[in-house]
Image: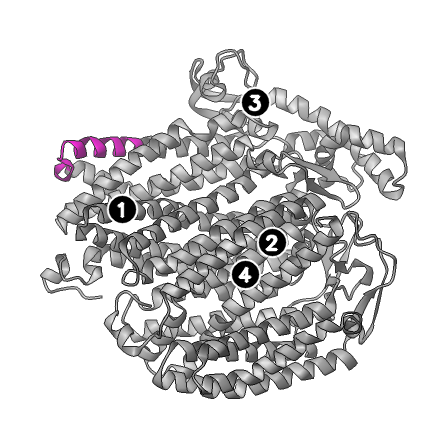
Amino acid sequence: MFDYESLRIIWWAILVFLICGFAVMDGFDFGIAILLPFLGKTDDERRVMLNTVGPTWEGNQTWLVTLGGITFGAWSIVYAVLFSGVYSGLLLLLFALFLRPVGFDYRSKLANPEWRSFWDWGLFVGGTVPAVVLSLAAGNLMVGLPFELDADMRSTYTGGLFDLFQLFPILCVLVGVSLCVMHGAVYLHWKTESFIAERAQAVIRWSSILFVMLFLLAGVWVAFGLDGYKITSAIDTTITANPLHKTVEKSTGLWLANYSIYPLLLLAPIMTVISALSAPFFTAKQHSATAFVLSSLAMIGAIVTAGGSMFPFILPSTLSITSSLTIWDASASHYTMKMLLAATIVFMPIVILYTSWVYRIMRGKVTVEQVQANEHTMY
Amino acid sequence: MITNEVVDLSRMQFAITAMYHFLFVPLTLGLSFILAIMESLYVMTNKQIYKDMTRFWGKLFGINFAMGVTTGLTMEFQFGTNWAYYSHYVGDIFGVPLAIEGMMAFFLESTFVGLFFFGWDRMSKMQHLSTTWLLALGTNLSALWILIANAWMQNPVGAEFNYNTMRMELTSFSEIFFNPVAQVKFVHTVAAGYVTGSMFVLGISAFYLLKNQDVPFARRSFRIASGFGLAAILSVIVLGDESGYTVGEVQRAKLAAIEAEWETEEAPASFTLIGFPNEETRKTDYAVTIPYLLGLIATRSIDEKIDGLDTIRERKRHRIENGMIAYENLQILREDKTNDVAKAIFEQHKKDLGHGLLLKKYTENVVDATPAQIESAIKDSIPKVAPMFWTFRGMVFCGVLMLFIFVASFYFNVKRDAHNQRWLLKMAFWGIPLPWIASELGWVVAEYGRQPWTIANILPTHLSTSSLSSGQLMGSITGFVVMYTALLIIELFLMVKYIRLGASSLHTGNYHFEKQGAGHV
């Protein structure tokens, strides 16, 4: 069961699971931050919006931090090559994320309208930029990044921030942002009432259609316009391997090859489209919880679609295609993977358990009356 | 090829971001426990004032915590962005505690911190109290895993080099968990955090007592801080991590530098109280020494020797020579994995491979190093004495001052007379910066003292960085400094504002400014 080959597949699955967890949990936080200046017309309304996620956003963001830690431990070279390569992009992400903890905590500590407006825009940036940068990163992972490994496994990267903005990744940004907006609006609809909920409903309607159109367009692009990668040499999946000991082929449409090898994978894009399109009907009928499950499924489906088409690649290289990192040659040692798996099996269920408890405690709608009555304790 | 400038800038960025982060972490560690103690008193006595105390100090905790999270994010990603080769080379080991930290500790603290602030009216008293304790537990577990990772950099155990993947790989999880350096470091660091939290509460409570503002509230806060603080400062000093400096060679070099032990002396070694270390003559000018003391503190015995810098330097020469042999055979092995002779020689010398890599700073090929280059590498392999000597003494000096403040506070508390000792209250107030100075100096002792290594005896600092340009680094350093400084100013502004308001910021109608009808947030 826990031979090296299976562990690599399990750890790929855990990576996908953590990305999904992050997207589902932090996706609506980002979406609400993007909608903040547009849906919240008054200070009270903006406070309602912030307080829908106020008690829980911090735990949600921990999915990203843990994702970083897990990548470091289980896929060290991916962590090293990716983060040092897209240096400016990552700093942009960090600087934007800096605004969130302080924005949430400091915004309502003073009554001064300029102070509050400053932090509202800070929170808008803190939600928008990460959604953009991370979708852009996802797009660039599918395109491949311009890096090369030498015999010491030192990576050199050619290209700067602006090289990340190619057409396909930009399309991915639109896909990701529209999905976050929909997901955020669905959560907002669930947690608020009257004006804000009505405005959220309108957003859900257009963003779901926009997302599905963009998602399908990206699919067509992957089939006919984007180069995919494939390992062409025999690869021993059971030993500690060196990425440079393989050969790789690159050509258009290869990212779809997995769909004929594993036809079940087709369920992911189908689920994405159906869930996203049906979410507005459930919010219209006030079945907000169901709608939230559906928009989460759309999130998960979209990530599995992208990750699944790249399998077993994690980080393809455009500069030297043999340097591409796959699950067979970028993983931690067998022993480390076993240890980390044990930790994950023990701790992640506990995390999910107490997170659910916290959401249960904080259940119910946030109202204008509530935030007015709790001027000094809520955000 | 990585230039020295890139290495220096990368180090500078790491030092700046880590030291900023460490302005907020110790307070989080200590204050979270103080909140848990205050709330426990509330649940036990059912007195509203303890709830108010938990909520007020909780507000200050929140202002600080936000900055801790902000600056902490950088730390999780910075190994990848700026220390990519390090991340590849030791990620198999170093990444493990970081990954576990995320799942076990960081989730815990960040999930319950929201509930701490928002859950007061939604839970039973016991449920909320559990939330506060879980928050404190989360912050401290977080420190545990981070320090296990950090201790592995100082004393790398339970790992082996794999020439196939060109990296270190984990061989024993229990060895890195039970690393003796980690144990000492954890106790020392969290206790320093408790001192920070206590000094913060003590000093601010003293400020209220001096101004006669909300005296019952301030006296109770002062009492809790003096008790917790005294226990904490005694732990820091008695369990100070000097005892951890006898384990592992880099730790021993650090100790020798801290104590300016230029030469190995007969056991038990004497302790240099003060003096002026002179790198040229390898002597300490005007040294005031106390016989036997160092040997007693560091080895807890009277017959164990402490290595002087001369002994350590000679060992380094030997290890660098071995390292060259290891490196030479590694090159042969990489071309031809079936070469059993090379393999045997490599296996025999591989524990010194890191010392061979020290030469990479001077010659790419390592094996062709000249005697002069070897001398330079030996010289590099010992941290500079004067900075270590002074930062350590600065830290200890702050510690001694705080010990005095806590002992005096505790004494007058027992006599129920602390609020009348104006000199003590003033001292406690002006002493607030002491724990921060001590913590930052302590960080410098531990991490500067690790040079020239990122991983002791395994990976030299100058090989650990990412392939970045000086321009990129200058850009990011500027960004960090501007961003962090701006946020720090905002944080201090809010902190001072809320400290001045005191318990009145709770808007319960029972405190100072509200009774006077003045001062509204």
Query: Closer to the camera: disc 2 or disc 1?
Result: 1
Q: Is residue B54 above or below residue B293?
A: below
Q: Is residue A221 above or below residue B519?
A: below
- Residue at the image point whose x is 37% and y is 78% from the top: A192
| Residues shaded magenta | B403-421
Q: Is residue A173 above or below residue A25?
A: below
Disc 2 crowd rating (10 Å Cα; few below 14, some 14-19, many 20+) is many
Q: Which mark is residue B364?
A: none
Counting residues from the start of the chain, the first of labels 4 and 2 encountered is: 4
- Do callouts 4 and 3 mark residues in contact (Cβ within 8 Å)? no
- Residue at the image point whose x is 32% and y is 63% from the top: B118
Mark 2 highlights which residue? A70
- Residue at the image point whose x is 31% and y is 77% from the top: A367
Which image quadrant for residue B417?
top left
Task: Find numbered disc 4 in the image and state the secondary structure of the residue it sits on.
Answer: helix
- Do callouts 2 and 1 mark residues in contact (Cβ within 8 Å)? no
Mark 3 highlights which residue? B281
Counting residues from the start of the chain, the first of labels 1 and 3 encountered is: 1
How much space separates mark 3 and mark 2, taking CA atoms? 49 Å
The answer to whether residue B296 is visible is yes
How much space separates mark 2 and mark 1, taking CA atoms? 35 Å
Mark 4 highlights which residue? A64
Viewer-proximal residue among B6 and A350: A350
Identify the amino acid type marked 1: Ser
Residue B186 at what x, y percent from top left? 47, 37
How much space separates mark 1 and mark 3, taking CA atoms? 58 Å
Residue B419 located within the stretch drawn in magenta: yes
The reply to whether label 4 and label 3 mark residues of one chain is no
Query: Closer to the camera: disc 1 or disc 3?
Result: 1
